[in-house]
Image (cartoon, helix red, strand yellow):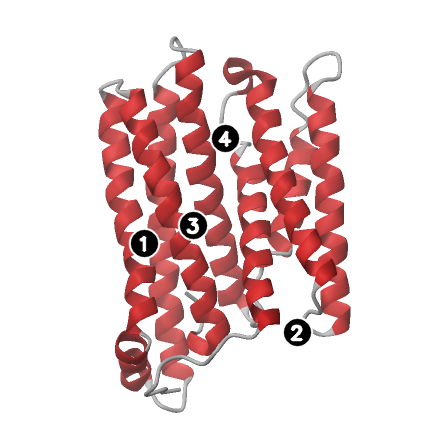
Amino acid sequence: MCYPSGPPEVSVSSGVGIATGFCTSAAGGILIALLLPPFQELRRFFFAFNASLALALLGAAAAMRDGTPAEAPEGAARLANVAVWISMALAVAYVAALYLPGRRQARGLLLAAGADGWQTARPGGPGWMFAAEALAAAGLLGTVIVAMILGHWYLVRPRLPVSHLVRFSLILGGAISVRAALCVAGLTLAGASSAAGLGATLMDLAVHRGFFFWQRVFFGIVGPAAFAYMIHETARIKSTQSATGILYIAVVFVVIGEFLARYLAVSGAGPM
């Protein structure tokens, strides 16, 4: 598993897989995260806006899947394509349901669309650890994106209780903690099960793949953890504009971290 000259090159198909996996992961995470905010206080446009963003991400994933041959087996690739289109249809139905008389939130449609989006976000490797990592990645991406958009809602609705943003900062911190714990567990299991052994595997990752690995740790875990604390503290003192500004940076960090995590997983480093 050691590559003295650096990690192997990632093919075009693998690169498309990284991009599609990111889009579906973010979309599924956004849709599931929408189960958390209070519908009566934020009103339907907040939910319609976030669901439309998830729909756009799913559309981008569908376009990339249809335009490039997949490396996965034909049956698995076809199933992933079907899941993306089903998730898109459910997301459209959810947005439409928001504007039907009665302003129903249609949580069932939201949950189904989010679950389909996550299913297509799984990395290429088998096993429960990859599935857990994909679910944690979706949760982190969805939470930070919805929290950032929530911060903007205080600009148009200044009387919105700040407790919602404080709550999301705590959820974000929890999502980062779960992501970090699964990353450590995945690396430990991958190293213990490899022929080279745990020590050699970690040395390969920290040294030969260090340029990508340490950026993944910094952008994907350490930086967002620090930002989550800052967001929590600024939200507590009702400085919602400052919290939203920090959330912008947190979104950028998490996006970079998740792209690097998928690159490392595709290049053979294991669950990240």
Tell me the SS state at disc 1: helix
**Would you say the residues marked 2 and 3 are in contact, meaning their CB atoms lie under 8 Å apart?**
no
Compared to residue 262, the image places residue 164 above or below, namely above
Residue 261: percent from the left, percent from the top?
Answer: 42, 63
Task: Please name the amino acid that badge 1 sits on.
Answer: Phe
Task: Please name the amino acid that badge 2 sits on.
Answer: Glu
Instruction: Report the residue marked by disc 2.
Output: 71
Instruction: Report the residue marked by disc 3.
Output: 255
Q: CA distance from mark 2 to mark 3?
A: 24 Å
Q: Give the number of the disc on residue 193.
A: none
Q: Residue at x 31, y 22 (%)?
A: 241
> Which circle's residue, 1 or 3, is located before the other in the chain?
1
Find residue 74 and report its image quarter: bottom right
**Would you say the residues marked 2 and 4 are in contact, meaning their CB atoms lie under 8 Å apart?**
no
> Which circle's residue, 3 or 4, is located before the other in the chain?
4
> Which circle's residue, 4 or 1, is located before the other in the chain?
4
Compared to residue 137, the image places residue 189 above or below, namely below
**Would you say the residues marked 3 and 4 are in contact, meaning their CB atoms lie under 8 Å apart?**
no
Q: Residue at x 75, y 48 (%)?
A: 85
Tell me the SS state at disc 4: loop
Instruction: Report the residue marked by disc 4.
Output: 36
Q: Residue at x 64, y 56 (%)?
A: 120
Residue 29: percent from the left, percent from the top?
Answer: 53, 44
Residue 215: percent from the left, percent from the top?
Answer: 30, 61
Q: CA distance from mark 3 to mark 4?
A: 21 Å
> Which circle's residue, 2 or 1, is located before the other in the chain?
2
> Which circle's residue, 2 or 4, is located before the other in the chain?
4
Q: CA distance from mark 4 to mark 1?
A: 25 Å
Instruction: Report the residue marked by disc 1.
Output: 219
